[in-house]
């Protein structure tokens, strides 16, 4: 069996051998069936959040599209829903259930913990203290409770992290353009390598450290040679400090309200966020499967429910 997590920007697939992450911007009508076709012929368990891409008129339309595309390749696919159960047809309960299946997999292993799953676009903060409490929570409700922070390792615009930065001690407003993204921040600071910068760059340029510094300089309407490398690095540090503060404050809030005693980190940003919040990095326990945790989890939960039949 394979596990599939279909997000708005990426399709993540977990197999017995490992994981594959395919860039698939559904808002640009990316060819989802073409990405799935090489995996045909295997049983599939699926979870999604891509139904919220703005190429769809509604969540229901997005769910119908994704279910149709999956079933064209995997006619017997099982879809995990917000009720904590698997389904075979399109229905509203399938919307944004990828975080819940992660909780479903971990709830008996780490019942007193909070899972912090940092992906390319968002960070899920999931209390494992009461699984029944999580069933049916919409993304709107998760934003209200602090369970969802729309800030990720790669795709988040720098202008959404900071409104101003200090340049040589001078407060400087940043432009609201998408000149640089979080991937540039983490690339410049050495948190990720070039091969981990897996989304398109804002200027369609290189993914080197220097290229990221140039894009960060553009955030204050300058070129790198105008402000210098140290100032561009300071922009990166200030953006990361702001992102880290936003996420950690919500982790503290959720831990306090849910009475959690420990934190776990998963996702492509697991190592980065583990250091920020003092969490146990599931990447060290699960290896590459942590990078595509909901895809791994939906596969494991489906196998568990089937008595681990292949």
Image (cartoon, helix red, strand yellow):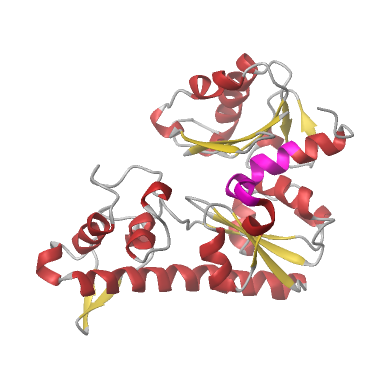
List x then y, in percent, for residue 179: 25, 54
Query: Image quarter for residue 118?
Result: bottom right
Q: Is residue 182 left or right of residue 62?
A: left
Q: Is residue 301 above or below residue 124?
A: above
Question: Which residue is at the far front?
Answer: 17
Observer able to see residue 309: yes
The magenta stretch spans residue 296: yes
Q: Is residue 170 left or right of residue 303?
A: left
Observer able to see residue 81: no
List x then y, in percent, for residue 16: 69, 34
List x then y, in percent, for residue 13: 60, 34
Residue at 36% over, 69% down: 239
Q: In which quarter of the image is the N terminus?
A: top right
The magenta stretch spans residue 132: no
Q: Quadrant of the C terminus?
A: top right
Residue at 69% over, 15% down: 75
Residue at 81% over, 35% down: 303
Query: Image quarter for residue 237?
Result: bottom left
- Magenta segment, principal secondary structure? helix
List x then y, in percent, for residue 150: 50, 56
Residue at 37% over, 61% down: 160
Q: Nearer the viewer, residue 163 or 216?
A: 216
Q: Is residue 228 left or right of residue 1?
A: left
Please provide the residue range marked out in magenta: 287-299
Question: Which residue is at the far bottom?
Answer: 169
């Amino acid at each position: 069996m394979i596990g599939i997590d279909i997000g708005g920007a990426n399709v993540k697939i977990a197999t017995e051998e490992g994981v594959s992450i395919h860039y698939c911007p559904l808002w640009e009508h990316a060819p989802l069936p073409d990405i799935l076709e090489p995996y045909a012929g295997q049983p599939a368990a699926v979870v999604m959040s891509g139904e919220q891409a703005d190429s769809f008129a509604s969540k229901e339309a997005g769910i119908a599209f994704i279910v149709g595309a999956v079933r064209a390749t995997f006619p017997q696919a099982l879809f995990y829903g917000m009720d904590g159960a698997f389904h075979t047809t399109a229905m509203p309960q399938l919307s944004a259930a990828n975080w819940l299946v992660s909780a479903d997999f971990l709830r008996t292993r780490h019942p007193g913990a909070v899972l912090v799953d940092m992906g390319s676009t968002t960070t899920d903060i999931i209390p494992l203290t009461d699984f029944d409490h999580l069933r049916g929570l919409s993304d709107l409700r998760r934003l209200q409770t602090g369970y969802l922070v729309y800030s990720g390792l790669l795709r988040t615009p720098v202008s959404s992290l900071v409104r101003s930065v200090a340049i040589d001690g001078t407060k400087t407003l940043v432009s609201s353009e998408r000149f640089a993204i979080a991937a540039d921040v983490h690339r410049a600071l050495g948190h990720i390598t070039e091969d981990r910068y897996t989304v398109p760059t804002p200027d369609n340029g290189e993914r080197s450290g220097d290229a990221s510094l140039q894009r960060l300089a553009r955030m204050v309407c300058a070129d790198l040679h105008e402000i210098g490398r140290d100032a561009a690095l300071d922009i990166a540090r200030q953006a990361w400090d702001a992102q880290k503060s936003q996420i950690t404050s919500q982790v503290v809030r959720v831990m306090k309200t849910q009475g959690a005693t420990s934190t776990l980190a998963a996702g492509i940003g697991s190592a980065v966020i583990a250091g920020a919040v003092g969490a146990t990095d599931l990447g060290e326990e699960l290896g590459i499967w942590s990078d595509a945790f909901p895809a791994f989890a939906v596969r494991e939960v489906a196998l568990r429910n089937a008595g681990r039949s292949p």
